[in-house]
Image (cartoon, rainbow, N blue to C red):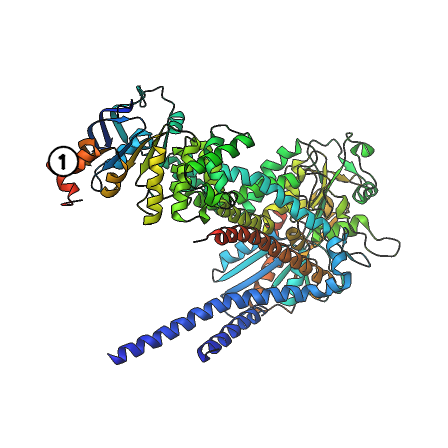
Amino acid sequence: MKPGRTFAAIISIALVAGLMAGCGGTTPNGSQSETGKITVVGSTSVGPYMDELSKLFMGKNPGISINVEQVGSGQGIAATKDGSADIGMSSRELKDEEKPLNEYKLCLDGIAIVVHPDNPVSNLTKEQVKKIYLGEITNWKDVGGNDAPINLYTREASSGTRGAFEELVLGKDAAGKQITIDETICAAVLNSTGNLGASVGNDKNAIGYMSLGIVPEYIVKAIKFNGVDATPENVKNKTYALQRPFLLLTKNEPTGIVKDFLDFCLSSDEAKAYLESQKLIIE
Amino acid sequence: MENAVKISVKNLNLYYGDLQALKEVNIEISENSVTALIGPSGCGKSTFLKTLNRMNDLIPNTKITGEVLLDGNDIYAGDCDVIELRKNIGMVFQKPNPFPMSVFDNVAYGPRVHGERNKRALQETVERSLKAAALWDEVKDRLSKPALGLSGGQQQRLCIARVLAVQPEVVLMDEPTSSLDPISTGKIEDLMDELKKKYTIIIVTHNMQQAARISERTAFFLLGDLIEEGDTIDIFKTPRDKRTEDYITGRFG
Amino acid sequence: MKQGTARWRMNDKVIRSLLFVCAAISVVAVLLITVMIFVEAFPALKETGVWDFIAGTKWKPTDTPPQFGILPMIVGSVYVTGLALLFGLPIGMATSIFMAEIAPPKVAVVLRRAIEILAGIPSVVYGFFGLMMVVPIVQTLGGTGMSVLTASIILAVMILPTIVSVSEAALRAVPAEYKEGSLALGASHWQTIVRVQVPAAKSGILAATVLGIGRAVGETMAVILVAGNIPVIPESILKAVRTMTVNIVLEMGYVQPGSLHYSALFATGAVLFVFIMLLNFSIRALTKTRGEKQKNAKKH
């Protein structure tokens, strides 16, 4: 090769390698000044609320820009661990292997079991829901509804809502291992709360699960669980058993603008007022 | 040479939008003859040729007045079937334009398009047409090979075979040899001598020697006017109009 | 005078090197991505065995021991893409024929703008439209509405602009002489289109198909909203399906980097990669043999 060509080849390889190396880097965790960028990554259940809170916060602090990415609890936890997110969002408790991370409880949320508004069934016991999602009950008539097949809708495997649902409803098997939803018997796997809500609203024979706070936005009916109405009050007084915490996570002790934002979300009156208006429970 | 009149053109005018391309053309073409249309570039001879098989219809904004009678019937009358017309009056173009198909499919294209499905009949037609175009011997072993693989002269003869396959009565040729070498040109000129026994041929040519060689009648066009028309010998030896004489002697064009 | 030419020669060299660097970056980037995919895919492929991975029908990454069989996803991708082509190619062809040969110029322009707009719509919008409008309609045919059929319909609309624009260009590029020759033989306009122009535009139409396939196979956002995404081989077009691309996206957030599951997702990517390469090569081979036949046939 001519010397010019060799030189050019070396430069290009170096450039590309450099670009790739740069992609794995970490973002600084807050600074002392009043400007900066915060990335918040995780649950699609928690996301919409954090989106709103970040807007409120940015309104007071125009120099700070906050980016909320809703990609699922699993990815949020992973991103927090590897440093690509300043704050992670999870809609379930952390598993042992995911600890340690700093966990901050934003609020409590109920998980509603939802069906199509025209579905006559309005109450299911935990046993019934478990059997339905294990494929042991397959027709609505077996739980007091119409003679029609039950179409199972579920979130994807990395969803915090799904993880919480599996933990609270399906429980563990004889060997002590968490029972998971078998996707092959489901009607559909959806990758966000919104999509699941929309899908259940489309299907008269559907059953699904989603964050209680979001239910009013979709044309679905939240049924009673073990005879208890799915309402924020019942989450607060613990009679509605399907509930899980919305967690904010950081890798290290938060400082600078990240700490400011967290304080805003967790302690400010404005944030609390907003969350309660959305039917979430502050403890 | 008292053949019947095949085509009779009366007071033909053609307009491309506002531009008048043909002015009051009157001419009679006899059956089984070769008529040459000569004249300088842009004089309207190709345009005139295209009025005979209504290929001008494809150009937007053209207007025609006058009559073109084929066997006494006006081809511009409302009830004329253009598809049938073009079957009866075939055209060979200046640049050979075989389809990107095999030799066989090219020649069989016309009959197929007009409804012929019988394999036997198609094979016979293809052979007959290729023989009539003096191309059979050269291609009989490569009928299924692409037509675009033939030489220029062969391609043009293929186009002639293609036209003959639909059994027209008239064959229009628009400068058919102008893109070919002298040997191919010679072959095609020989062909025309044979063809005129069965068909009426009208050929536009830039090449006056060619016109003199192959045609019985010649028509000289200039700027959309048919200046003079008559027996080829008379036109070339004793032209009546000065403009004709000037063109023939090469003073312009 | 001498100094001027020397500077020109220097500039020339610099520009050449610059252009070479740019081209090299593209090539190097592609190579690096390819290598990375296969390197990360290796552990899962080794553990499961390439054949069991491709032909296995059970995708249960969280079982002990985990099972990684992506046949349902391969079949899913093939079904959905194939059906999308079945719908999209004829409609695309008909549209391009209409635009190139039949429509008056003003109408053709309006159509072209509409197609361009269609091309610019983001995938997720298509997906949402599919979820809200197409799923309920397909539901009336039976099932939940989230199915192979729904995904194919959406994909067919998405690949339409590609097919139409490339096919139309190919049709317009067909020499006018062919059309003239055909009409002069007494063929009708439609016969000319079908027997001469479309076959003459074959390689362009093939290119349009390849591009359409490429887009359909790689499409994720629109599919994930309407296909149901369950990892089983669909029994009919009204059943739910999971494509290879969706498999990667759905499980992405769940995996720990370095785990076997993580590697299995890369392996899915590797299979997708090979799938598309094979498709491209075979279509290129088909067109080449035809082109070479034409070339070899020329004798002078």
Q: Residue furthest right?
A: A174
* Quarter of the picture holding the N terminus of chain B: top left
Residue tagged by mark 1? B238
**Mark 1 surroundings: few (<14), some (14-19) or many (≥20) residues within 10 A:** few
Q: Single out the residue that lies furthest toward the left.
A: B242
Judge left or right: residue B229 versus residue A149: left
Percent from the top left, x then y, of residue B206?
25, 42
Say which of A182 and C96 sits in front. C96
Among the 4 quarters of the image, the one containing residue A27: bottom right
Q: Is residue C9 above or below residue B6?
A: below
Q: Amino acid at mark 1?
A: Thr
Q: Quadrant of residue B37?
A: top left
Q: Which residue is farthest front?
A: B1
Left or right of residue B130, residue B31 in this image: left
Q: Where is residue B187 drawn, in percent x and y?
A: 36, 43
Residue sitting at x 50%, y 39%: B104
- Subunit ID for the residue under disc 1: B
Question: Looking at this view, is A275 or C34 the one in front?
Answer: C34
Residue B23 in view of the camera: yes
A270 relative to C234, above or below: below
Picture mark count: 1
Check disc 1 and report its element: helix, strand or loop. loop
x%, y% of residue A241?
Answer: 77, 47
Kindly indicate the quadrant of the structure image that contains residue C105. Answer: top left
Q: Could you say where residue B80 lies in the image, as x and y percent from the top left? A: 36, 21
Q: Is residue B64 left or right of residue B89?
A: left
Q: Nearer the viewer, residue C81 or B54?
A: B54
Q: Is residue A278 visible?
A: no
Quadrant in which the C terminus of chain B is drawn: top left
